[in-house]
Image (tube, helix red, strand yellow):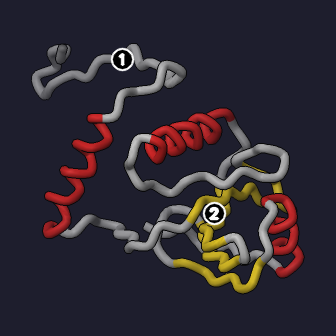
């Protein structure tokens, strides 16, 4: 389900480009997803700028590192684009924004049945990539439907 669209201003577009080292040719709003997203066509390539509805945090850096790890291991995902200060998120006006390289495709609110096999194959590829040592380890166990602890 899509969040309400957050309209950025021309000066905010300029600040985003300045912070992330981009030369903007054109910006257009994208539909779908849970965040407000814009497609930026720049001299450096095509990027998705996401306006995040949350504060800056460590979690974003962990996600960015994980996306880098997946890309480095042959799985094409939206690679994070770091700001000129090396950050994955920047505060621009009243908004927290992140930038990722654009990957062509379609955003689905509900995955169509015809794509389930492809999604399963992609998930298998993700699980074939060794987890990096720095990735936080989860200590919780999943419970099955009868309430027993799954091992």
Give the left or right position of residue 57, taking residue 108 as reference: right
Q: Residues within 10 Å of mark 2 (few under 14, many from 20)?
A: many
Residue for badge 2 = 50
100 is higher (above) or lower (below) than 75: below
Q: CA distance from mark 2 to mark 1?
A: 31 Å
Which residue is rendered at x = 58% and y = 34% of the image? 62
Give the left or right position of residue 134, taking residue 60 as reference: left
Which residue is rendered at x = 69% and y = 37% of the image? 57
Q: Nearer the viewer, residue 149 or 125?
A: 125
Residue for badge 1 = 140
Q: Nearer the viewer, residue 94 or 132?
A: 132
- Residue 115: percent from left, percent from top: 19, 65
Q: Is residue 49 visible?
A: yes
Between circles 2 and 1, the one closer to the viewer is: 2
The quarter of the displayed image where residue 99 is located:
bottom right
The quarter of the displayed image where residue 51 is located:
bottom right
Tag 2 secondary structure: strand
- Residue 76: percent from left, percent from top: 41, 55
């Amino acid at each position: 389900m899509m969040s309400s669209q957050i309209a950025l201003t021309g000066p905010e577009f300029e600040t985003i480009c300045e912070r992330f080292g981009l030369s903007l040719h054109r910006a257009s709003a994208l539909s779908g997803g849970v965040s407000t997203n814009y497609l930026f066509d720049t001299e450096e390539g095509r990027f998705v700028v996401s306006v995040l509805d949350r504060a800056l945090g460590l979690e974003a850096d962990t996600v960015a590192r994980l996306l880098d790890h997946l890309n480095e291991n042959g799985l094409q995902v939206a690679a994070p684009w770091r700001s000129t200060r090396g950050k994955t998120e920047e505060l621009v006006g009243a908004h927290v924004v992140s930038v990722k390289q654009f990957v062509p495709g379609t955003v689905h609110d509900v995955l169509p049945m015809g794509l389930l096999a492809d999604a399963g194959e992609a998930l298998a590829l993700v699980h074939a990539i060794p987890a990096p040592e720095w990735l936080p380890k989860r200590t919780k166990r999943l419970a099955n439907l009868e309430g027993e602890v799954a091992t």
